Image (cartoon, grey):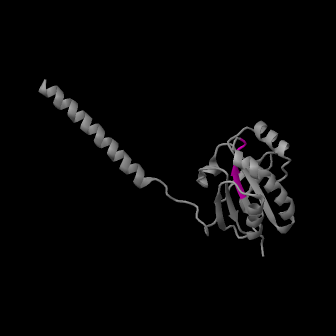
């Protein structure tokens, strides 16, 4: 009887030690690289909703308003008309708005785009690869990227039309 308890306790102890060891290993080896203001925006290539490829680095020389969103996100839906209005005001000032949809179907996104009459590029991150690289948590999240490809600001949460205008003004190339 004592031998069975000793074997059981030893097994439990080994299991706990393995769990603690794994936790320590996972915490010390995880990638804590975050994309910070002032760093270069990671390049990517995504397909637009209309099937064209778009590469972020091809936009060097332009200010880029990089917005991560989803059709189910009410704050995202609220700011899209503001982004469209300001896109019309800023597109001739060497500014690009890119709206990266996170893992939704083309049909759902197309319906949303038509309903809101959006004309700026909608990029499809079907496998969440860019979302993972940019470490997107809550949406909407927007990266403001200057003409040199450097991140100037990261905004999490919905914006008003005034906010969108102000942020676009801050990345107009000089």
Residue under the point 73% across and 70% down: 170
- Quick one: which residue is furthest to the left in this view? 2
Q: Nearer the viewer, residue 114 or 20?
A: 114
Which quarter of the picture shows residue 142? bottom right
> Image point 21% across, 33% down: which residue?
9
Residue 68 forms part of the magenta stretch: yes
**What range is drawn magenta here?**
66-71
Q: What residue is rendered at 85% in x and 52% in y?
A: 119
Tally of marks: 0
Looking at the image, residue 38 lies above or below residue 102: below
Magenta segment main secondary structure: strand
| Vertical relation: 10 (above or below) 120 | above
Q: Residue furthest top?
A: 1
Q: Is residue 35 magenta?
A: no
Q: Position of residue 123 (x, y in %)?
A: 75, 49
Q: Is residue 97 in sight in this rendering?
A: yes
Q: Quadrant of the C terminus?
A: bottom right
User: In this view of the protein, which residue sits in the foreground, 74 or 55?
Assistant: 74
Query: How far from the left and from the top, in percent, is residue 105?
Result: 73, 37
Could you tell me residue 150's position as x and y percent? 66, 68
Q: Residue at x 73, y 56 (%)?
A: 55
Tell me residue 147's x, y (percent). 74, 69
């Amino acid at each position: 009887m004592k031998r069975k308890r000793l074997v059981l306790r030893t097994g439990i102890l080994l299991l706990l030690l393995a769990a603690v060891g794994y936790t320590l290993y996972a915490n010390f080896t995880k990638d804590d690289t975050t994309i910070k203001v002032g760093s270069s925006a990671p390049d990517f290539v995504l397909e637009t909703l209309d099937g064209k490829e778009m590469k972020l680095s091809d936009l060097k020389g332009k200010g880029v308003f990089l917005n991560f969103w989803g059709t189910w996100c009410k704050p995202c839906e609220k700011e899209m008309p503001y982004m469209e209005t300001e896109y019309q005001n800023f597109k001739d000032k060497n500014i690009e708005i890119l709206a990266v949809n996170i893992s939704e179907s083309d049909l759902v996104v197309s319906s949303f785009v038509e309903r809101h009459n959006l004309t700026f590029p909608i990029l499809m991150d079907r496998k969440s690869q860019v979302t993972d690289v940019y470490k997107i948590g809550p949406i909407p999240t927007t990266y403001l990227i200057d003409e040199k490809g450097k991140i100037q600001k990261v905004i999490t949460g919905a914006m008003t039309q005034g906010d969108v205008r102000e942020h676009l003004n801050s990345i107009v190339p000089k």
